[in-house]
Amino acid sequence: MTRKERITHMENLFDKSNEVVRQLRQAIADFQALQPTIDELDNYYKTNWRADFEADEKGKLPADLKRGVLSEDGLWDLLEEYQQLKERLVEEE
C-alpha cells in the first residue's frame, strides 16, 4: 500500500468513525430525552392498559383505530427493553 493509499484508507476510516460517534451521541441524547414518554407509557400500562385491552378484545373499539400499544406483549417488551438499555448505559459509564 502506498502512502497515499494508506492515508486515503485511514481518512475513510476516520470519516466513518466520526459519523458513527456523531450518530451514537445523538441516539443517546434522544434515548435520555425519552424518559418522560417511557414514564407515561409505564403509568398507562399499570393503570388503564388492561381495561383498554379488554375493550379491544370485546370489539368495543373502532376497527380503524391503530392499537399496537394494546398488543399483549408489545408495550411490556418495549418497557423491558428500555430498562435493559438504560442499565447497559449505566454499566458502560
Image (spheres, rainbow, N blue to C red):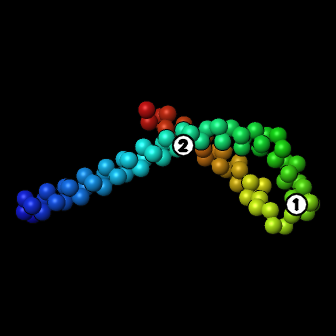
What x and y, as percent, mark residue 37?
Answer: 66, 42
In this view of the protein, can residue 72 be seen by the observer?
Answer: no
What x and y, as percent, mark residue 88?
Answer: 51, 39
The residue tagged with tag 2: helix, strand or loop?
A: helix
At label 2, counting other C-alpha atoms closer than 10 Å, the crowd grade (few under 14, some 14-19, many 20 or more) is: some
Query: Which amino acid type is marked by label 2?
Result: Phe
Q: Say which residue appears at 85% left-offset and 48% top-offset.
A: 50
Query: Which amino acid type is marked by label 1?
Result: Leu
Q: Say which residue appears at 84% left-offset and 67% top-offset.
A: 63
Please give left or right for residue 31 compared with residue 23 in the image. right
Cα separation between marks 1 and 2: 32 Å
Please give left or right for residue 79 compared with residue 88 in the image. right
Which residue in the protein does label 1 denote?
61
The vertical placement of 69 against 84, above or below, is below
What x and y, as percent, mark residue 80?
Answer: 64, 44
Q: Say which residue appears at 49% left-offset and 38% top-offset.
A: 89
Which residue in the protein does label 2 denote?
31
The vertical placement of 18 against 2, above or below, is above
